[in-house]
Image: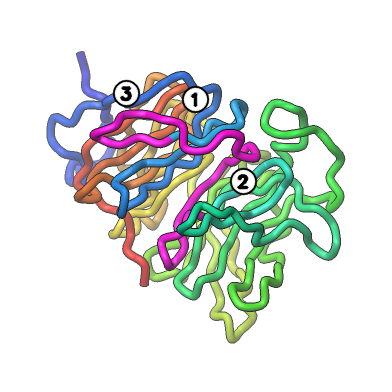
Amino acid sequence: MPGPTETLDPRFDDLIVPGAELRRLADGCIWAEGPVWMPESKTLIWSDIPNNRMLAWSEDGGASTFREPSGYTNGNTLDREGRLVSCQHSPGIVTRTEPDGTVITLADTYQGKKLNSPNDLVVKSDGSIWFTDPPYGILSDHEGHQRESEIGANYVYRLDPESGDLTVVADDFDRPNGIAFSPDEKTVYISDTGEPRHMRALDVNPVNEGGTLANSREFAKPDPPASDGFRVDANGNVWTSAGDGVHVFTPDGTLLGKIHTPEKAANCEFGGPDGHTLFITATTSLYAIDVAATRAPRP
């Protein structure tokens, strides 16, 4: 039987451990999302959105429940202090988990109106939190609770770490979803799971110039669609979920290869004790494969 990887450019072979096999670590989810590696505990945490829970996996302990209910948590990441920062579809907030387990709300409204259902997020080196806010958690009771959007649009936001102010950094996405920075943070990648179901790259202006975005252009359009969540490796390659697994693109948008999964992939994360494990959340399951790449270090 063929292996799980498909090489489309010879450079892809340098990113995958020879003979690496795709391993199924856990199952039983309805829609697995938001994987984040916790270095201190050597644990992978991820979301099972419709089941309103978060799960944890470790080499020694296997899979267990991390938090239930979870506020229909979707995307997760770590801040500069290693604290868990999460997007909760319902009640539509961005939260941070303190070391003692206390969960505090960082953002819940924009100009006095409730956010839709924060989806995915990334923390920049200056501590600012950038997140997407499509309507998936308010369209029905499947991934949250159905309600009308108070904002009436689907924005990408920057949360200032000092003032707590929210700024709209992108307002022309249909349904903005995954988000990540290039290693030098001069580019931000944002996926749109609405039309036209592609990924964009945008230039990031310095904060002293307003921290705005410019030069929006199509970066990639995975086939089969669509790019949901993704990560960037130390060389600037983008590892994005797609309809048949994970697709790997160079910074110039060249497709290098694919890691095929038996189920539609939603997101991925670099982790493991040496950083060379790619964890993949795909529909009902959590998968892993050994790779030669590692996640981009923070500037």
- Residue at which label 3 appears: 24
- Image quarter of the C terminus: bottom left
Rendered image quadrant of residue 268: top left
- Image quarter of the N terminus: top left
Q: Secondary structure at mark 3?
A: strand
Q: Secondary structure at mark 2?
A: loop
Instruction: Determine whether, in the image, residue 17 is placed left or right of residue 98.
Output: left
The structure residue drawn at horizontal position 36% and vertical position 50%, both measured from the top left corner, is: 38
Instruction: Determine whether, in the image, residue 218 is placed left or right of residue 114.
Output: left
Identify residue type, mark 2: Asn
- Residue at which label 1 appears: 283
- Residue at which label 2 appears: 119
The structure residue drawn at horizontal position 61% and vertical position 84%, both measured from the top left corner, is: 209
Extreme left residue here? 18
Identify residue type, mark 3: Arg
Where is residue 158? Give x, y as percent.
Answer: 63, 66
Q: Residues within 10 Å of mark 2 (few under 14, many from 20)?
A: many
Magenta stretch containing residue 222, yes or no? no
Per the rendered image, the range of residues in magenta is 56-85
Extreme front residue here? 100
Q: Is residue 291 visible?
A: yes
Q: Nearer the viewer, residue 52 or 129?
A: 52
Where is residue 181? Give x, y as percent.
Answer: 46, 61
